Amino acid sequence: MEQTSNASIAAAFTGYQKFLIGMLTFLQFTIILDFMIMSPLGAIMMPALNMTTAQFGLVVSAYAFSAGVSGLLAAGFADRYDRKKILLFFYVGFMVGTLCCAFAPNYIFLLLARMVTGLFGGVMGSVVMAITTDLFPMSQRGRVMGFLQTGFAASQILGIPIGLFLANHWGWHMPFLAIVFISFFATLLIIFKMKPVNEHLKYKSDGNALLHLWHTLKNPMYALPFAITGVMSIGGFMLMPFGSAFSVHNMGISLERLPMVYLVTGLATIFIGPTVGKFSDKYGKLRVFTFGAILTVISVIFYTNMGLTPLWGAVLINVIMFCAIFSRIIPAQALISGIPSPENRGAFMAVNSSLQQISGGVASVFAGFIVVETATGKLEHFDTLGYILSTTVIISVFMLRHVHQRIVAR
């Protein structure tokens, strides 16, 4: 367990730190919403564009694959510029890609639009992580990660239900237009309110971008954290694309009542994220991660084997699963962020994000072939995905223990 003083745990955030957390959370909200909205829209988009489950899995994974490629390309330059400028560049590109999704007339165009969105939006997470690691000490980082995860909760509470409402009334194109609209205000915050983040430029870094990327990739200290990210991404990306279709066709939740599931789950996660972050800083990040892993295995195996379920049952299992997910993601991110040194932190985060997206993309493709949609719309072999996810979670516990030992050894 991390040895952290009570004083450091109780350290209050400054006014600017609070603003920064709020702004980055808002950015996370728009980025996560753009990715998450694909799952609940799946039940509408697949028949509208005549997509099979395999094709829809490819649309989801196209974002991940292009994000993985751009993460590797951006890694060499990630530590050579002010992180504020990098953040702004990729966020504007993300807005353009999302706008293209809004006007997609067919499957092929949508596939290409998701690739463009992934090229820019997929790197945003790594930039946010680098900024967070630069500006917040390890003793505060669990709480910061917890607050950042409320961006996910906000997408559940506001974005997904509203997105489904817009899609049900004006077509599936409308949610993407709404994301572009709100992202414009986030862009203004970056331009006019955010201070430069350039302290890392004081450290000596490789002058050549490719050399900087190569040194990051071959660093033996980074191999295990990269592997953990890959393993953790596999299971989550398998379940996510087919969540709404499973809820509708297997659990018997109607499309009209589906937004309620996301709404209540999101309300719960608003409190779960900060609480998990606080517990991670107070009781130890590895302990919280282990608890989350155990809860994940139990809840996911139960969930993926569910049949017809009342609305309250669907809400309850979703809340439990997201509690388990946050209990793994938040402490894992906080621990892994303590591995890279300042001069190559941006490159590390970019490569780490790239591996996350590529691993998730591969998982989404395989999930599309494992899961079979019957003539009635019911999904078969969904439980197989749950067993695969559970296996990866168990493996990740043992891997993260070694990372924790490195942090303590320092």
Image (cartoon, helix red, strand yellow):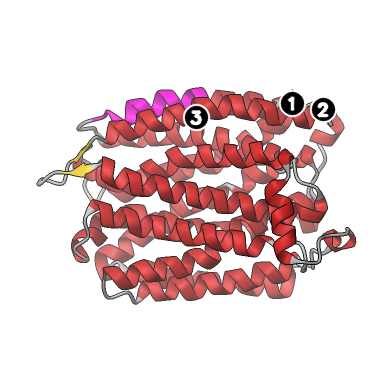
Instruction: Please tell me whether residue 307 belongs to the stretch shown in magenta.
Output: no
Q: CA distance from mark 2 to mark 1?
A: 6 Å
The answer to whether the residue labelled 2 contacts the one labelled 1, judged by CB atoms less than 8 Å apart, is: yes
Q: Is residue 390 visible?
A: yes
Q: CA distance from mark 2 to mark 3?
A: 25 Å
Q: Residue at x 44, y 60 (%)?
A: 63
Q: Disc 1 designates what residue?
A: 405
Q: Residue at x 69, y 45 (%)?
A: 144
**SS for dot 1:** helix
Q: CA distance from mark 3 to mark 1?
A: 19 Å
Q: Quadrant of residue 312?
A: top left
- Closer to us: 210 or 199: 210
Residue type at the position of mark 3: Val
The answer to whether the residue labelled 2 contacts the one labelled 3, judged by CB atoms less than 8 Å apart, is: no
Pointer 2 or 3: first along the chain: 3
Image spot of residue 252 (x, y percent): 20, 39
Image spot of residue 88 (x, y percent): 65, 71
Q: Secondary structure of the magenta portion, mostly?
A: helix
Q: Is residue 186 visible?
A: no
Q: Which residues are magenta?
A: 293-306
| Image position of 197 (left or right of 36) | right
The answer to whether the residue labelled 3 contacts the one labelled 1, judged by CB atoms less than 8 Å apart, is: no
Pointer 3 or 1: first along the chain: 3
Image spot of residue 258 (x, y percent): 29, 48
Residue type at the position of mark 1: Gln
Q: Disc 2 designates what residue?
A: 409
Check disc 3: other Cα within 10 Å, few if <14, some if 14-19, many if 20+.
Answer: many
Image quadrant for the N terminus? Answer: top right
Badge number at residue 393: 3
**SS for dot 3:** helix
Residue type at the position of mark 2: Ala
